[in-house]
Amino acid sequence: MQYYSKACKGFGATLSFFNLFNKKIQEAQKQDSNIAKQSYTMAFSKYLDKQSVLLDAEGEKLTSIGFSRMIESYSTQSGIIKFFIAGAFGFEKEVLEQHKTISLSTLTFSHEIAKIVLVEQIYRSLSIINKHPYHKL
């Protein structure tokens, strides 16, 4: 993940990572899926806005080219994109309906693998946008 984060700086992009997992989420996940989803919403709600993209298994399936177009669109609008990965039970339906939602794959990934895939795709997108040879067209 650090390799791609550092490589993104070559395109003028700074990536920051924040872990919002807390004790309330940890306890909620032991109870049931609805309570867990509510705990994710409570933890994330103050950070969610129009620059937010939620990662969800049922989200829009994008190619790398499509992902780069999304990155470029957000970049020209505000220069900021926030990606969110929920816990094991996913986001509440209402939260999903309010924000852009994408899927990295039809496979299920751990948070750590999802972050690596996401950061690599961000780097790949910047390569596509800047016509860098990393992404072979």
Image (cartoon, helix red, strand yellow):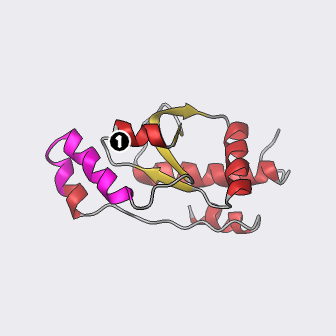
- Disc 1 crowd, CA 10 A, few/some/many (<14, 14-19, 20+): many
Quarter placement of the C terminus:
top right
Instruction: Check disc 1 and report the residue beneath it.
Output: 90
Q: Nearer the viewer, residue 33 or 121?
A: 33
Q: Is residue 63 above or below residue 135?
A: above
**Does residue 73 lie above or below 15 as drawn?**
above
The foreground one among 51 and 72 is 51
Q: Check residue 38 for magenta coloring.
A: yes
- Quarter of the figure that contains the N terminus: bottom right
Residue 19 placement, left or right of 1: left
Asked whether residue 25 is in view, the answer is: yes
Position of 38 relative to 21 (above/below): above
Residue 121: say if magenta: no
Q: Who's the residue at 46% across and 52% down the image?
A: 84
Q: What element does badge 1 sit on? A: loop
State which quadrant residue 5 falls in.
Answer: bottom right
Q: Residue at x 36, y 36 (%)?
A: 93
Q: Please state which amino acid type lies under the numbered disc 1.
A: Gly
Q: Position of residue 22 (x, y in %)?
A: 27, 63
Q: What segment is highlighted magenta in the picture? A: 27-45
